[in-house]
Image (cartoon, rainbow, N blue to C red):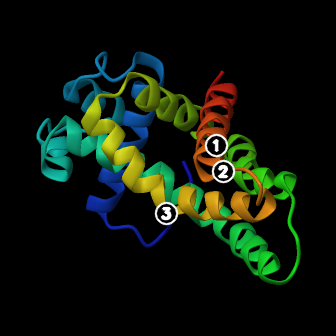
Amino acid sequence: MNIPIELTASDLAKLRLIHAAIKLFATKGIEGVSLRMVNREAGARNNSALHYHFGNKMGLITETISYIQDWFEKNRENQLATLELKAKTKAICVAEVMDVLIDPYVKLLETETWGHYALCALARFEFDGDEDVHHVLNQTSGKVARRLRGLLAKSCPDIPRKMINQRLNLSLFITLQGFAN
């Protein structure tokens, strides 16, 4: 776990809980994880630490998804902004858009000790999550998905928007599941 030096003790405790949750959700699924298990995995001595930071299990799931998606946004932004800038003046191809989609998955696996667990946890949230979990997933990844859709529309102007949406969603699912496996 790469930890910024400027974290307070409270922030560090919260980060440990998130990393413990990522690992547990990845290995045991949503239903297989209890708040007590997360506290134990994080080494929290106070059983109320999780409730203090997240409120309940859904709060923990929300923060866990946000933490992972924030990592993706931070690590995708430069490449995404560069391609958007290029698309204003030049033609772009589908391969360039797919590189922007896929490169952060590769980087996560190669650079973060928690990367594989994060991808597995996201896959569990996507495939096992209920309506509330899907709502969080859509909220946290919606902005980037819209930007990617816009780029795909520019690279494939003859393909209807509905089909672009379907293909992007399928690409996201396959990419996530493939890297998680």
What residue is shown with label 1? 163
Is 161 placed above or below 176 here?
below
The front one of 43 and 149 is 149
The front one of 107 and 12 is 107
Q: Residue at x 72, y 74 (%)?
A: 84
What residue is shown with label 3? 143
Query: Which image quadrant is residue 45 in?
Result: top left
The front one of 73 and 46 is 73
Residue 158: x and y, percent? Answer: 77, 55
Q: Residue at x 70, y 51 (%)?
A: 101
Question: What amino acid type should be assigned to the residue bearing mark 3?
Answer: Lys
Q: Residue at x 84, y 58 (%)?
A: 96
Instruction: Determine the secondary structure under disc 2.
Output: loop
Residue 121: x and y, percent? Answer: 47, 31
Which mark is drawn over residue 160? 2
Give whichever of discs 3 and 1 has the lower sequence position.
3
Tell which tag, 3 or 1, sits nearer the viewer. 1
Q: Residues within 10 Å of mark 3 (few under 14, many from 20)?
A: few
Question: What amino acid type should be assigned to the residue bearing mark 2?
Answer: Pro
Circles 1 and 2 in contact, beta carbons < 8 Å? yes
Question: Quick check: 40 left or right of 50?
Answer: right
Instruction: Determine the secondary structure under disc 3.
Output: helix
Is 150 placed above or below 59 here?
below
Question: What amino acid type should be assigned to the residue bearing mark 1?
Answer: Met
The front one of 179 and 149 is 149
Q: CA distance from mark 2 to mark 3?
A: 20 Å
Question: Quick check: 78 left or right of 131?
Answer: right
Q: Residues within 10 Å of mark 2 (few under 14, many from 20)?
A: few
Residue 106: x and y, percent? Answer: 75, 44
